[in-house]
Amino acid sequence: MNYKLGTYAVAAMMAASPVMADLVFPSLSYRTGPYAAGGIPFADGYADYFTLLNERDGGIGGVETRVLECETGYNTEKGVECYEATKGEGSLVYQPLSTGITYQLIPKTTADGIPMHTMGYGRTSAANGSVFSHTFNYPANYWNGASGAINYLMSQGDIAGKKIALVYHNSAYGKEPIRTLEELSEKHGFELMLVAVDHPGQEQKSQWLQIRRERPDNVIMYGWGVMNQVAIQEAANIRYPMENFIGIWWSGSENDVLPAGDAANGYKALTFHGVGSDFPVFDDIQEHVVDKGLAAGAGDQIGTVLYNRGLYAAMLAAEAAKTAQEIHGEAEITPAMMRDGMEALEITEAKMTELGLPGFGPSFSVSCENHGGPGLIGMTQWDASAGTWSLISDFSETDMEVIQPLIDEDSASYASENNIEAGC
Amino acid sequence: MFYREAGDFSTTYPQDSQTFPIKFDRYRYYVVLAVAVLVMPFVMTDYLVNSIFLPFLIYAIAAIGLNILTGYCGQVSLGTGGFMAVGAYACYKLMTAFPDVNIFFHVILAGGITAMVGTLFGLPSLRIKGFYLAVATLAAQFFLVWLFNKVSWFYNYSASGQINAPERTVFGIEVTGPNTEAWATYLFCLVFTVGAAILARNLTRGSVGREWMAIRDMDIAAEIIGVNPLRAKLTAFAVSSFFVGISGALFFAVYLGAVEVGEVFGITKSFLVLFMIIIGGLGSIFGSFAGAAFLVVLPVVLKIVGVDLLGWPTDIVAHFQLVIVGGLIILFLILEPHGLAQLWRVAKEKLRLWPFPH
């Protein structure tokens, strides 16, 4: 009986969905579960930017956009279900915002010919476009992040002989930077200390006792969701100096620092895009989206770090769609065309200014070999009294001498495991 | 009317003790099986397989496994997720170590390895029972997940700690990896599900099953009439873990293809399978299927109705799902502790007498 009901419902859904006359951007969001605090602002930013394009410009190249939202709860099974449910509707690009779901979808999207953009997360070696033909992770990846943090520390002083701790979410995501940091510690002569925190990360007492005992000079954190706020609170409890505490970009939003109050002052986080709402595009969002009552979610996230990231992701997707339209001379692009657009994407400072986002992110271009972008990393710092994040360094180069061999090695092993012939 | 027994005579003992003694019931079972094997593969789409049928078939195996332990033998277990992880990682290690052996045997071997691990964790059941055993199996759950995260040998020293299923074929047709056909994965899992159900059904109505049920109903009385509790409990743990291991192997290799142990085989998985047998019906093979179908299909239907038809925000629908599933569990525990299987049995009794109930 239950299958029948399901089948009817699916059939009804298929019949009810409109003909493909718009550009579909699925949003595998999570507004529930232990990671919702990060999922909500990202999904809002992603949806609002496409609403803005529809309201202000009439879509992309004259074709309306449609954001198809599907709730995953950061759960891989639901993510797969969402992917299967939405891929038939002409979905152009997937952005699951979850490393676990990314791993599921890399082979599936490649087999189905739909591109996937894992901006600053997912499988780092997907930067090698000759192996991962349909996966993109520009403009920066986890290994750039690890190297960026070390570069920043080196710019502050000599790190040889110092002890640096990595506090990480004990999952594929958190384990990603370990290899890079090990290589870097060999190269620069610092001591690496690994501290794992299990999902979802509410219990970190013993880890921070260990940090208090070992007294590392710096702590780097790869956390997400509730783990971040707990870590920052615990760091404050052991009076760890906040300016020596650096989070990856997923550990650097308002949600993470606000619970600790003034104690979080000076906490740093890496970033690959600008912070704050001091960009012209936000005036447009206010005028065309918020004032018309079209803002996604509760509409209270505008200008937060993760909202900006969702906005940035949507902007990059929209620009790739534009590029695809230009390449193929067709307004209603297919996922295959979208992939070509992403591979030919070029973001220049002039383009960013035109979009109302001057200086928001680095300018870069994607190529068939390099799906990972330039990996330019900036540093932000939290000011608790003002309640704002501010950029305290330029977007600067990371150590590709260390990262590129790791990318080649990991992608080569993926290629041999899955019988993929390197293209390009 | 529907279940007419007139003219349905049993003339031998085997006829009398068959699983479906009523002719109508028996033929219905054959029809369902024939449709599942001969018709369904032709109408399979990626969506139907990945959202409904694969999870249903795989969870049904896990539910049968847990039902043997909890429903038939009365040993409460919260370690299902951990044992599924054992199956998944065993299958992964076998697939990568012996690439030339057919995946079919790997899945069965993974079940065997899980049976051994399960027996090991079943040893405390000889001394403790009920609530205390639940806590001991809970420890197994956390220990196993920790182990697979900690020891990099289990994931072949990959940098991310994820395991990925390589492409493997059966009769030249791919059943794991990204390029599988919907019908192939469906049929592959169907074979295991049907096999597990037949095996479990026959075990539970034989002497082994009677021992389990005797232990469940009153262990001291069972011991007095000659049931060996050590043997009964450990066989229950072994058989149960065997099924759970197979489902874990299929879950990883065929359904998801890539697994991260903490997220996929966490404590929520143990609870989900436990809810399946509570809603479906403890001590019933049909209940395992009904419970698995219910908890797999319900969220999908709620999502389709809420998001696609009514246009509600996705987070509200997700929260409603939690409320509805939670509410249903409470309702079932109060109104029908024997679950959907008992509702079905009652309905069948009524249908046998209909339209002359007196």
Image: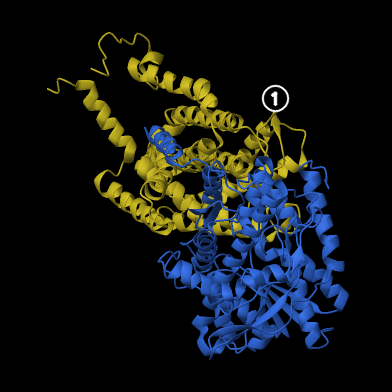
Chain colours: A blue, B yellow
Task: Please tell me whether mark 1 sits on a helix, a strand or a loop.
Answer: loop
> Splitting the image into 4 quarters, where does residue B166 fall?
top right
Q: Is residue B260 visible?
A: no
- Residue in view at x 69 percent, y 49 percent: A339
Question: Is A299 situated above or below B23?
Answer: below
Residue toward you, A374 or A203: A374
Chain of the residue under label 1 = B
Residue toward you, B42 or A194: B42
Residue A36 placement (x, y as % from top left): 49, 65
Please, which residue is most extreme toward the left here? B358
Q: Is residue A151 visible?
A: yes
Residue A60 placement (x, y as % from top left): 59, 55
- Residue in view at x 27 percent, y 27 percent: B348
Residue A103 placement (x, y as % from top left): 65, 52
Residue toward you, A146 or B130: A146
Question: Is B74 situated above or below A293?
Answer: above
> The N terminus of chain A appears in which quarter of the rendering?
top left
As drawn, is A395 to the left or to the right of A19? right
> Splitting the image into 4 quarters, where does residue B165 fall?
top right
Residue A70 placement (x, y as % from top left): 49, 53
Count of marks placed on residues: 1
Q: Which residue is mark 1?
A: B171
Residue toward you, A328 or A70: A328
Instruction: Please name the amino acid that badge 1 sits on.
Output: Phe
Question: Is B82 situated above or below A194?
Answer: above
- Residue in view at x 31 percent, y 9 percent: B9
- Residue in view at x 34 percent, y 15 percent: B23
